[in-house]
Amino acid sequence: MARCSKCKTEAESLYWLDSMRSSLCQSCLIEHYEKKVKRTIIKYRMLSDVKNLGVAVSGGKDSMALVRSLLNIFPSLNFTVIHLNLGIPEYSDACQALVQKFCQENSIECITYDLKKVEGYSIGDFATSKLGRRICGICGVVKRYLINKVALENGLDAVATGHNLDDTVELLFNQYMSGALGDLVRNKPVLPSTHPKIVKKIKPLVEVTEQENLYYVLSTHTGYVDRECPLVKGSRMLKRKKLLLRIEEEIPNFKYLLFKSHVKRFLPILEKHFEAPAIRECERCGMPSMNSVCSYCKLVSKLRLSSPVSFSSH
Ligand code: SF4
Ligand SMILES: [Zn+2]
Ligand SMILES: [Zn+2]
């Protein structure tokens, strides 16, 4: 039997953590994970001034790890789960059932927003339209827009999301490569509210890896949807994540080091010199936008033109 690197107890199965280059038993893994998440929340003052927190939960391992760790670390914290049913065939309904069951079992208020029922279209409709080649980018715009809208309409003053270190570094890699300064400035652990209709966003898992999230849900027996979204196949984002894992094999802790340099060294300089674009209100939906029509409204009108979907009048 092998020994846990931390408590030295013999255990039948251990979790090998790439980030620590060591193996932990179940209870040390849980302790290590929750300490790390708590430290991140405190370090970036994520919950300061937050009275009504929303937690965006898709049902995947990352957001389930987020909601479970918040329950364990802050047992008296009241929060509301926001779940978007994106209408992805053979996927979204299973996600919704899992999230609702978890919330019921843990007495958490859950707001479910069914895209097809409320808006009359789904991400599945985008996927089968002419716009389908960029599906994850489209889905990202829709999710960001709706999470903010739902939070705003329900009086929530911050939303926590399950973005992990791998997601963040994959984005950083892409943004530095393409010189997307505006996006780089917004790639940070806390996005404050910069407009009365923009709800603050926090990323409590920004310093934990996908692997740590997986081991945490397994070791806390937290259910999650154990399959990938069927639309992700062949996405460039997945290819970049695989490449970053290979770099990490050669340069230990590469992902965390890149993230830390960005937040500590580059971000303060970028923020000083990069003037944030003025925010106005979209002339169609009234939500915050950098242009006269917001990205969400532009996408939806493109879908109307390119597919036979019948939209609700809403
Ligand atoms: S994999 Fe892409 S399409 Fe599927 S839920 Fe994620 S962002 Fe949306
Ligand atoms: Zn141990
Ligand atoms: Zn709009």
Image (cartoon, grey):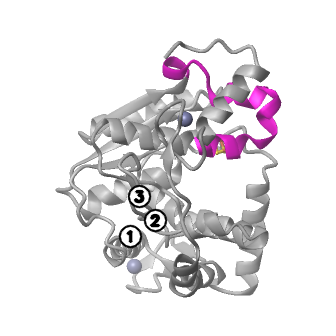
Residue type, label 3: Thr
Residue 211 at x, y = what percent? 57, 66
Residue stretch rendered in magenta on the structure: 116-141
Residue type, label 2: Leu
Residue 193 visible in rendering: yes
Q: Secondary structure at mark 2?
A: loop
Q: Is residue 239 left or right of residue 197?
A: right
How far apart are the alpha carbons under marks 2 and 3? 22 Å
Q: What residue is rendered at 42% in x and 86% in y? A: 6
Q: What residue is rendered at 74% in x and 13% in y? A: 308
Q: Secondary structure at mark 3?
A: loop
* Nearer-N-terminus badge (2/3): 3
**Magenta-span inclusion, residue 196:** no
Please state which of residues 172 and 241 is positioned toward the viewer in this rendering.
Answer: 172
Query: Up-down: is 27 above or below 2?
Result: above
What residue did someone put label 2 on?
205
Disc 2: residue Cβ within 8 A of ligand 1's nearest atom: no
* Nearer-N-terminus badge (2/1): 1
What residue did someone put label 1 on?
37
Dominant SS type (magenta): helix
Residue 247 at x, y = what percent? 75, 79
Q: What residue is rendered at 35% in x and 78% in y? A: 43
What residue did someone put label 3 on?
194
Q: Is residue 247 left or right of residue 82?
A: right
